[in-house]
Amino acid sequence: MVATMAPMIVTVQQHILEEQKKRSDATGTFSWLLSGITLAAKMVEAKIRSAGLLDVLGSLGQENVQGETQQKLDVYANQALLHCLGMRDSVAALISEENEEPVVLDRDEKSGKYIIVFDPLDGSSNIDVNVNVGTIFSIFRRPDGNKDLNAAILQPGTEQVAAGYVVYGPSTVLVYTVGSGVYGFTLDHTIGAFVLSNPNMRMPDHGSYYSVNEANADSFPAEYQQYLARLRSGGMGRKYSSRYIGSLVADFHRTLLKGGIFLYPPTAKQPGGKLRLLYEANPLAFIAEQAGGMAIHGNGRVLDIQPTGIHQRTPFIVGSCAEVEELQRSFA
Ligand code: AHG
Ligand code: MN
Ligand code: MN
């Protein structure tokens, strides 16, 4: 009698190990590190799922370094990531939206090889209304022989060795890249693991949605206003529809799957843009490019920006090549 085999599944852990085997210098450290992120993501997801039943909704009555009201879940998600990653010997420093300064861990240069940057809970103003939120992360290598950790922390996005995000939505999805394509995994609660569901994700060359907070449109620079008018009028050869969730991860995830464009331009209130370079724009720009899309800050590539501060902001435009290139031409 032939035994029936269960269908083959690939967990994120297996996938990372396979990716690492392709590299000659792989030691397994990197997959252990990423397992810290997936563990924290599962902790956050469990808390979010039961948020309506536990006393975890609402604000804490205090502000973070950005002057934004901290939600209880912002703090929980931050602690989960700091805890799960802080235990990994390979982590030299952790940079979080919720911490004013980098959390520097006492590691020697040999073992403390990685710097991890994250937005623990993105879109947290949506949490009380049961709308998708997420976690975004980015990983840099500490350059060999590096003594000045601050210099190692402020690397441009081109130096990222991995980036990813988790969307806590109708299902919980993790998307990541190590610079050789983009892979998506869905959390299977029956086995408690992220299972490969979207191999080799590609952003469509163009799409039918644009995503922007149009309430700010009157104060966008003229190039953006004219571009949005072209999208609305059909001047770009197709009819566009608008979608804006207000959780960057969720707006990005839709753009990755369906194509189109997401924009957070400069505004009168935020002339340098609102979104944060290190833990919002860079990781998503890396994923977008790996999936065949583009990410710009106006007239240049997001990944080329040399950061000067850990919480710096940037205008952020990301999406399919057709839509992003059309906007970029206005700045030429
Ligand atoms: P966070 O919750 O991590 O502070 O991020 C909020 C961000 C982002 O998720 C979203 O794209 C943007 O804020 C929405 O801003 P507006 O409300 O100004 O449109
Ligand atoms: Mn955010
Ligand atoms: Mn956040």
Image: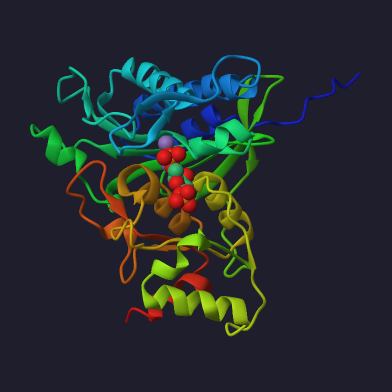
Q: Residue at horizontal 53%, vertical 66%?
A: 320
Where in the figure is residue 311, as x and y percent of width and height?
A: 26, 42
In this rendering, the answer to whether 149 lies above or below 231 is above
Asked whether residue 219 is in view, the answer is: yes
In this rendering, the answer to whether 165 lies above or below 285 is above
Q: Residue at horizontal 38%, vertical 77%?
A: 222
Where in the figure is residue 39, as x and y percent of width and height?
A: 49, 21
Where in the figure is residue 216, as x and y percent of width and height?
A: 45, 62
Question: In front: 309, or 63?
Answer: 63
Whether residue 248 sits left or right of residue 158 in the image: it is right
Where in the figure is residue 102, as x and y percent of width and height?
A: 22, 30
Q: Which image quarter holds the C terminus?
A: bottom left
Q: Residue at horizontal 30%, vertical 68%?
A: 300
Q: Which image quarter holds the N terminus?
A: top right
Residue located farthest toward the left when viewing the structure as drawn? 147
Question: In front: 22, or 309?
Answer: 309
Asked whether residue 262 is in view, the answer is: no
Whether residue 62 sits left or right of residue 294 in the image: it is left
Q: Residue at horizontal 40%, vertical 33%?
A: 69
In this rendering, the answer to whether 230 lies above or below 37 is below
Question: In front: 22, or 68?
Answer: 68
Q: How is the image coloured?
A: rainbow
Q: Quadrant of ligand 2?
A: top left
